[in-house]
Image (tube, rainbow, N blue to C red):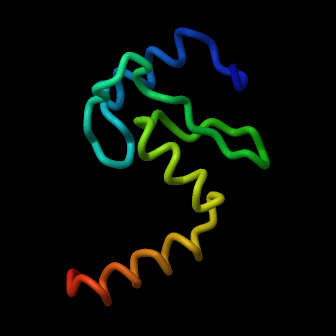
């Protein structure tokens, strides 16, 4: 899938210690880690848990939107 072999997936899984590349948690669902890829180029980026994978998709992989979301949370929650 997405141009990588099962062995390459296994190597990525080992490099990430079986954890999500974003939240660094081990998945708790049977689905395990999702293969994250750039939807424009098809290039594989890493392995993500379901929640982080869906979050990136919800923000349309747009870094400006993600930055605005961070600023929103900081301004409303008072966190840094």
Camera-nearest residue between 80 and 4: 80
Q: Quadrant of the C terminus?
A: bottom left
In the picture, measured across the screen, residue 26 lies left or right of residue 21, that is left
Q: Is residue 1 above or below residue 38?
A: above
Q: Residue furthest right?
A: 40
Residue visible at 68% across and 46% down? 38
Camera-nearest residue between 17 and 48: 48
Q: Is residue 77 above or below residue 18?
A: below
Q: x%, y% of residue 77?
A: 24, 82
Q: Is residue 48 above or below residue 32?
A: below
Camera-nearest residue between 20 and 31: 31
Q: x%, y% of residue 1?
A: 69, 19
Image-quadrant location for residue 49: top left
In the picture, measured across the screen, residue 14 lies left or right of residue 43, that is left
Image-quadrant location for residue 28: top left
Q: x%, y% of residue 50?
A: 44, 36
Residue visible at 56% across and 9% down? 6
Residue visible at 57% across and 74% down? 65
Q: x%, y% of residue 16?
A: 34, 31
Q: Is residue 70 above or below residue 19?
A: below
Residue visible at 32% across and 90% down? 75
Number of marks in the rendered image:
0
């Amino acid at each position: 899938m997405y141009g990588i072999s099962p062995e390459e997936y296994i190597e990525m899984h080992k490099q990430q210690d079986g954890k999500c590349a974003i939240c660094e948690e081990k998945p708790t669902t049977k689905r395990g880690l999702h293969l994250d890829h750039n939807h424009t180029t098809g290039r594989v980026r890493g392995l993500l848990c379901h929640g982080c994978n869906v979050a990136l998709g919800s923000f349309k992989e747009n870094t400006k939107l993600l930055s605005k979301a961070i600023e929103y949370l900081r301004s409303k929650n008072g966190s840094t």
